């Protein structure tokens, strides 16, 4: 099993380019099920999750191929199956995104209940209640979510929580429903806007994406398009934190600064210097950082997917910091790994109190989930000595060629496939 080996303490300087957004690409890929004509997607990241989604679509009857770097074609014009394969869906929660488009297209669907990172309970009941509001009969049978409808009828859907996944699934289902629908208390993340833009590109009629109320006018059919996925704001945020702790200056290129307001504000509050350009952010903090308080919230609040990475910066900041996690109940698994590196972090319920230390020290650690794995890489890069990170398959789910890109800005980092690592 692969590991990442880091010899930390090297100043990091240079430019690092951001890949396409995983959390935008996956629902857009699922949405190709709605199309009766070929679709070309560009700026798709080369990640395990993307490959898994492509295999899910292929199992459902979609023809796809990779036609260039970050460029894929999808053709769902043929016969499409109503049942997603358990062996693939169990490995990736985002596979559940196929339920909305399959229900819209076939009026019947059977999808196994999903898997994914063990960061907390993420129930699908919000999705299912929304499908019921559109006229589907929903049940759980043999570990699968099943939905059947004679036809889907537009309706007003009020979400109990601004769930990103539910907003996306329901937007796809409503795109082919009869009449008008609205999703209230909708998620406002940039990935929602990207999916709406893609659906509109293939002929949907959606307005209000990025606001709490999304309106969908159902259409009879959807066609083809060429579409480019937005930059990954979490990957960009990870590199921005690296610029603030890496002892040099890092230019984060091909990003969307408008998606980073919450993180930019916190890094500046900590004392980092940021220069903002149209598609680039330059970050440094040569005078060190100071502690801050953070609470994770749905967008436009501070993203839960960035709290582990920012905690690394807090671990070496002057004074005391705190993070309150309001989205997931089990998202402090990285705390015990940081403690192995000398961090001083105490948790109580959903709040972590971080007392800054002078430096972290390299140690064997695990990537307990995707973003915790990114945090371990950041910690290893600034730690004294050697850090060995196991379970890096989590990192592979969200960061394309992370080791290669970090090497280009001066990191002493390598990926080793053999579990036996010698000095």
Image: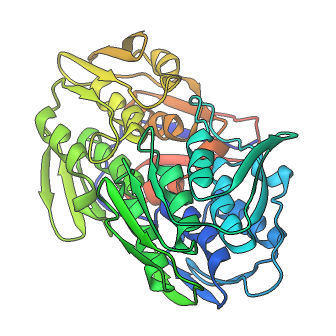
User: As displayed, is residue 85 above or below residue 43?
Assistant: above
Across the whole image, how many numbered discs are drawn on residues? 0
**Viewer-nearest residue: 123 or 400:** 123
Quadrant for the C terminus in the image: top right
User: As displayed, is residue 375 above or below residue 139?
Assistant: above
User: As displayed, is residue 352 above or below residue 295?
Assistant: above
Is residue 72 something one can see in this rendering?
Answer: yes
**Viewer-nearest residue: 16 or 248:** 16
Is residue 397 something one can see in this rendering?
Answer: no
Q: What's the residue at 41%, 17% (across, down)?
A: 350
Q: What's the residue at 63%, 31% (across, down)?
A: 118
Q: Could you tell whether 328 is left or right of 257 in the image?
A: right
Q: Could you tell whether 260 is left or right of 33 in the image?
A: left
In which quarter of the view is residue 287 placed?
top left
Q: Could you tell whether 50 is left or right of 258 in the image?
A: right
Q: Position of residue 125 (x, y in %)?
A: 61, 39
Q: Could you tell whether 160 is left or right of 276 in the image?
A: right
**Viewer-nearest residue: 112 or 403:** 112
Q: Position of residue 187 (x, y in %)?
A: 39, 50
Quadrant for the N terminus in the image: top right
**Viewer-nearest residue: 355 or 421:** 355
Q: Position of residue 153 (x, y in %)?
A: 57, 66
Q: What's the residue at 67%, 45% (across, down)?
A: 393
User: As displayed, is residue 316 above or below residue 219?
Assistant: above
């Amino acid at each position: 099993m692969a590991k990442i080996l880091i010899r930390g303490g090297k100043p990091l300087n240079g430019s690092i380019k951001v890949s396409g957004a995983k959390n935008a690409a996956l629902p857009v890929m699922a949405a190709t099920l709605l199309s009766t004509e070929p679709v070309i997607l560009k700026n798709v990241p080369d990640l395990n999750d993307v490959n898994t989604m492509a295999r899910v679509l292929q199992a459902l009857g979609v023809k796809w191929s990779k036609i260039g770097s970050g460029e894929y074609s999808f053709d769902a014009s043929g016969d499409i199956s109503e049942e997603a394969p358990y062996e693939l869906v169990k490995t990736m929660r985002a596979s559940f995104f196929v339920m909305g488009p399959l229900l819209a297209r076939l009026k019947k669907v059977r999808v196994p209940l999903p898997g994914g990172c063990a960061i907390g309970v993420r129930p699908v009941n919000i999705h299912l209640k929304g499908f019921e509001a559109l006229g589907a009969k929903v049940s759980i049978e043999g570990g699968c979510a099943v939905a059947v409808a004679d036809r889907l009828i537009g309706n007003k859907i009020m979400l109990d929580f601004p769930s990103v996944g539910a907003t996306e699934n329901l937007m796809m289902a409503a795109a082919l429903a009869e009449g008008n629908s609205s999703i209230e208390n909708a998620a406002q993340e940039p990935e929602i806007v990207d999916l709406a833009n893609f659906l509109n590109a293939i002929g949907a009629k959606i307005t209000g994406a990025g606001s709490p109320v999304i309106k969908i006018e159902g259409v009879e059919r959807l066609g083809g398009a060429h579409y480019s996925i937005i930059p990954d704001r979490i990957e960009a945020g990870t590199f921005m934190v690296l610029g603030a702790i890496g002892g040099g200056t890092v230019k984060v290129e091909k990003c969307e600064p408008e998606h980073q307001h919450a993180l930019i504000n916190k890094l500046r509050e900590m004392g980092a210097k940021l220069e903002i350009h149209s598609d680039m952010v330059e970050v440094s903090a040569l005078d060190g950082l100071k502690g801050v308080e953070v609470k994770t919230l749905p967008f436009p609040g501070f993203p839960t997917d960035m709290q582990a990475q920012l905690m690394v910066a807090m671990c070496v900041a002057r004074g005391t910091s705190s993070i309150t996690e309001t989205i997931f109940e089990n998202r402090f698994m990285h705390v015990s790994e940081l403690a192995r590196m000398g961090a001083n972090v105490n948790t109580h319920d959903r709040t972590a109190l971080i007392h800054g230390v002078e430096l972290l020290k390299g140690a064997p650690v695990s990537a307990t989930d995707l973003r915790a794995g990114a945090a371990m890489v950041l910690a290893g890069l600034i730690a004294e000595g050697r850090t060995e990170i196991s379970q890096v398959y989590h990192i592979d789910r969200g960061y394309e060629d992370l080791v290669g890109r970090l090497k280009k800005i001066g990191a002493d980092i390598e990926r080793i496939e053999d579990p036996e690592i010698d000095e």
